[in-house]
Image (tube, rainbow, N blue to C red):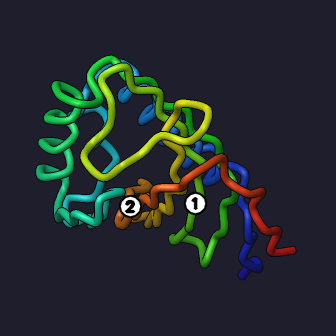
Amino acid sequence: MAPFDPAPDADEAALRAILAAQQDAWNRGDGRAFAAAFAEDGDFTNIRGESMHGREAYAVRHEQIFRGVFRDSTLAMQVAGIRFLGADVAVVQLDVQVASPNGLPPGVRVAGDGRLHTRLMDVFAKADGTWRLVASQNVDLKGPPAPAQSRE
């Protein structure tokens, strides 16, 4: 049996492709496409501390925000780190910026640069060769994020 490769190129590429597709879906305002890789039984906590369970709830909530406060917003995500916990589990840290011409949800403020900055932690699991987003938590930052700490 071959030893576990802690950062398989194909798996990292697959995760990055999911993230790129999510960014594209957000920027098109497509909640269904944004939720395409979310697990049927996935869990998400947003920047206001609201939790939702399941792909359908995740898709519906994104459809709502794309018609409301985040209509015509732009999302930029930068991978701050990918950590493989095994052959079928990965934790991805993302630095996220949102520019929203319609403002932000109550209680959420923009940073000095006029953008919303968040740190998103996504947990992905692979089953039957397919990566799915199984858990995600988004934390509102009050300014540009500090550089990610290296785990090496």
- Label 2: which residue? 128
* The C terminus lies in quadrant: bottom right
Tell whether 95 sits left or right of 73.
right
Give the quarter of the image for residue 6: bottom right
**Whole-Å distance between the Cαs marked 1 and 2?**
20 Å
Give the quarter of the image for residue 71: top left
Residue 114, given in percent of the width and then of the height, sits at 53, 30
Q: Give the foreground label among 1 and 2.
A: 1
Instruction: Identify the amino acid type marked 2.
Output: Asp
Tell whether 139 sits left or right of 13.
left
- Label 1: which residue? 92
Residue 32, given in percent of the width and then of the height, sits at 21, 34
Q: Which sits in the foreground, 91 or 117?
A: 117
Q: Which sits in the foreground, 102 or 25?
A: 102
Tell whether 28 sits left or right of 32.
right
Q: Is residue 1 above or below residue 66?
A: below
Residue 98, given in percent of the width and then of the height, sits at 47, 34
In the drawing, what numbered circle is on residue 148?
none
Secondary structure at badge 2 equals loop
In the image, what residue occupies the spot 55% across and 53% down? 142
Tell whether 66 sits left or right of 34.
left
Secondary structure at badge 1 equals strand
